[in-house]
Image (cartoon, grey):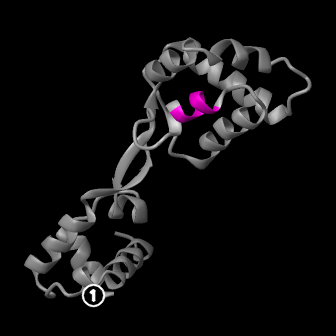
Amino acid sequence: MTPQEAQLIHDAIEADPVLSAQPQTSDGAFAIAEALNTPTEAGFKPITVASAMLWAAGGPRVRIQQATSDTQKPEAIRASCQVFLDLIVSGSDALIHTEQSAIKTSFDGWLQSSIITQAEHDAVYGQPNGLAAALLSRSVVAIGRDVSYQDVMQARAS
């Protein structure tokens, strides 16, 4: 665990009276790790290219394709549409990292540019049932991964 990660976990523990009240023992650290690793916070996860293909086939694919050559659309919008089409046409088993802000910005831009509808946007990003919707643990939100009891002990020692 990096010093930055330890500090973030330390801060999360200190901000929660239930967690900070746990004893400074391995049992206390285990209880804290379990609490921090329990999925409870709304967030986003990657989706498969196959899921994106099915989503696009449901309506927006033609509009996304038309947007790639629409000179009235901003270059960033045209480019993101082209990258998306290239990816779904490839049929790869890759993931589209919808949890990354740049990808969400692309989908938001498509919505603002009337390339996709609000319902199509919600089919990907709508909570709780969108393709990319997920429950994340506090540890994943804080440092991008689950923590062990050893991580908690290190964080509490810092």
Q: Quadrant of residue 80?
A: top right
Instruction: Depth check: give the residue in front, 29 or 115.
Output: 115
Q: Is residue 151 left or right of residue 77?
A: left
Q: Which residue is mark 1?
A: 157
Q: Quadrant of residue 48?
A: top left
Q: What residue do we see at 67% from left, 25% from top?
A: 83
Residue 117 percent location from the top left of the image: 66, 28
Q: Residue at x 13, y 87 (%)?
A: 23
Against 112, residue 49 (above or below) is above
Please tell me whether the stretch drawn in magenta is mainly helix, strand or loop. Answer: helix
| For residue 101, side relative to residue 137 (left or right) | right
Q: Residue furthest front?
A: 119
The image quadrant where one finds the C terminus is: bottom left
Is 75 rendered above or below residue 6? above
- Give the magenta part as a residue range: 118-122
Residue positioned 25% across, 60% down in the render: 37
Q: Quadrant of the N terminus?
A: bottom left
Q: Position of residue 66 (x, y in %)?
A: 77, 14
